[in-house]
Image: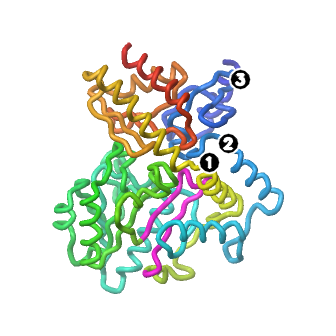
Amino acid sequence: MGNTQEIINLCNTYVLNTYTRTPIVFVKGKGSYLWDEEGKKYLDFFPGWAVSGLGHCHKRVVNAVSRQLRDIIHVSNNYYSKPQAQLAERLSKNSFGGRVFFCNSGAEANEAAIKLARAYGAKEGRYKIITMERSFHGRTLATIAATGQEKIKRGFAPLPEGFVHVPFNDINAIKEAVDDITVAVMIEPIQGEGGINIAGEDYMKELRALCNAKNILLIFDEVQSGMGRSGKLFAYQHYSILPDAMTLAKSLGGGLPIGAMVVADKFVDFLKPGMHASTFGGNPIVTAAANAVLDAIEKENLLDNASRMGDYLFKQLSRLKRRYPKIINNIKHKALMIGVELNVDGKEIVDECFNKKLLINCTQGNILRIMPSITVKKGEINKAIKILSEVIAK
């Protein structure tokens, strides 16, 4: 533990204490595996909080970034950049058209969407945005105001006004919340931090119709559900509707920090030059990485892999549920976005899995969040299930 402890001590001395950290130092990653400073190997089924959607150090991403580093690292957004232009085209053509704003994170993408909505409603004095209970939209002041979890907001009052939270999957609650100053509804089609809660198809269709009738924006937060995790490139594609704006981040950069907001053609003129910006947004390095992510998804048939492996993982977890009904209450899933709802606190299970070299997550106190990379293999799933079964049995 010599070198490991030195690094931990350095962090604890000089890095602001805003995270609950596990005392381990990871130094290498490849695919679904991580290695620590001592050379021990871990199976990662929650890679980088879903950032490493292709697994760790995917060769296409590594090669694309290496090539780009040799050419040019940064270009001001007052000029043009080839990988940024190419990525914007691909995101537009693979979704619902329109244009793209680039930034560095999911929170920033959601900030951009909030500003788009306010700019759209400014002339009529409309600014209220409806979001969902148990939602999560980021850690900035505006995005914690948008987030439907009180624990996220504590200690930061007063927050920006204009947000109201309603129950998820309840169209009547949204109808009751809409008034003359409502300008948008912002929703995760699959809530991640909220516990892998999946929006119903009829609910989404009614929501789209309501937004059309009331002339309000429908914004999809796909920061966690986007980029293939749901078995489609974007989760909204499971529903027969289109959003007016969509936010992306996490898996988009294959491990590098990038966020994006895709805006439908009808709304692209509401944010004009000088109204919004991001110094590093759409940087050549991160957009080269994101183009490589799209290449991998397209050329390696990863949407199909996410669907097949997601179904297989769900079946194996369902067997555990039948074996341990007092522990496992329910399993929620859409491809490789999986929540295992427990009848007990989840922390002990997560900790014991870690001791057995399996990395998973717990959210909302009792929901195991299992989200392996979309490149995951059946053998890796079998290994994870064996460890999880041993832990639950214990």
Which residues are the magenta region?
245-266
Amino acid type indicated by mark 1: Gly
Q: Is residue 18 above or below residue 348?
A: below
Tell me which numbered mark, 3 or 1, is placed earlier along the sequence: 3
Q: Quadrant of residue 202?
A: bottom left
Q: Which mark is residue 255?
A: 1
Which numbered marker is on residue 3? 3
Mark 1 vs mark 2: give the one in front: 2
- Percent across and percent down for residue 219 are 38, 66
> Which three-letter amino acid code belongs to the residue tagged 3?
Asn
Spatial CA distance of label 2 from label 3 is 24 Å
Type of amino acid at the residue the image marks with label 2? Cys
Q: Is residue 260 found inside the magenta-colored segment of the image? A: yes
Whether 197 is drawn above or below 83: the answer is above
Other residues around mark 2 within 10 Å, as few (<14) / some (14–19) / many (≥20): some
**Crowding at mark 3 (Cα within 10 Å: few <14, some 14-19, many 20+):** few
Colouring of the image = rainbow
Sequence order check, earlier mark of 2 and 3? 3
